[in-house]
Image: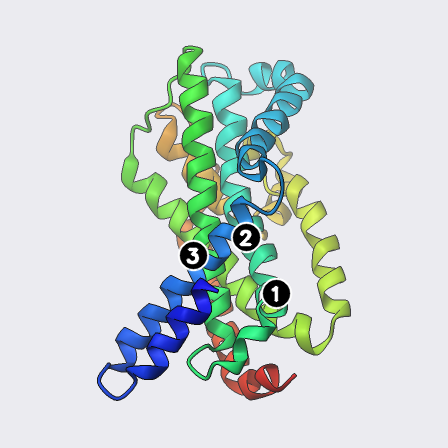
Amino acid sequence: MAFADDTTNVQNRNSVRSPASITWAVWKALFLREAVARLFAGRAAWVWILVEPVVHLFYLNLLFGFVLQRLISGIDGGMFITTGVVGFLMVQNTAMRSKEAITANMGLFTYRQVFPIDTVLVRAALEAMLVLISALFLFTGLGLFGSGVVPHDVLSVMAALSALWLSGLGLGLMMSVANELVPEIGKITDMLFRPLYFLSGIMYPVSAIPPAYRDWLLVNPFVHGIETLRTGFFPQYHAVEGVSLSYLLVFALVTLCLGLALHVRFGGRLVAQ
């Protein structure tokens, strides 16, 4: 109802408002709608958003904590895994939630100010905000237990998280169109992200991988973002040769361009469905 009212107001004032102000009003209305749906979808849904990463990290520390202490001496194992999980979730949650944005908001395309790409961009922004809130919650908890949670290079951390989010957004733009045109692609992408979880260096340092296989691991662009994130947090952590944030940024740029091109090419078909 709130979205309909906001959109009606936009329609009534089209003649006196600029395209940029109309787009901003649409994004605000969509963001409010998405936030309410995400945080209050069920009983205490917002609590689970915070608790789920904590449970996740607890099991990872239980399974790999002892091994990590042997591989990364001098670095807190809990923080090491947390940085990996936060970095990967920034990509995965953004991409996978954005993939379903068009389907979830199909009824809104009767308003001519709302385009499919708007729903993807807003949902990606919401997911980034939720991941950052969850990360703040996790770091606060680890800090209370004595872990060092303040990064020594804030700019590197911000750059890595931004590049990972842009990668997720690019993938989300592409998959949101593909998911509508060929629904089976959505199932394939779900399966692809499962092995990527284990191939992105979340639970182990890349330096622990034998050199013969390390080059193959570095083909995964998310590894570069997570390794850069860790070098920003831990001054004593040194990424292996070949890790480059530029590689991830190029991947993000390519996926963004392809995603935008798909929305331009098939935008009319997506609205008509």
Q: Are marks 2 and 3 in contact (CB under 8 Å)?
A: no
Point out the frontmost of discs 1 and 3: 3
The mark that comes first in sequence, 2 or 3, is: 3
| Position of the C terminus by quadrant | bottom right
Determine if residue 166 is in view.
no
Q: Residue furthest top?
A: 146
Q: Nearer the viewer, residue 38 or 6?
A: 6
What residue sits right under mark 1 in the picture? 104
* Tag shown at residue 125: none
Where 48 falls versus 268 (above or below)?
Answer: above
What residue sits right under mark 3 in the picture? 32
Q: Residue at x 71, y 47 (%)?
A: 194
At which x and y percent is residue 60?
A: 64, 25
In the rendered image, which quarter is residue 19 located in? Answer: bottom left
Count neighbours of disc 3 (C-alpha within 10 A) and say few if under 14, some if 14 to 19, many if 20 or more.
Answer: some
SS class of the residue under badge 2? helix
User: Amino acid under label 2?
Assistant: Ala
What residue sits right under mark 2 in the picture? 37
- In whole angstroms, how far apart are the C-alphas of marks 1 and 3? 14 Å
- In whole angstroms, how far apart are the C-alphas of marks 2 and 3? 9 Å
- Residue 69 placement, left or right of 188: left
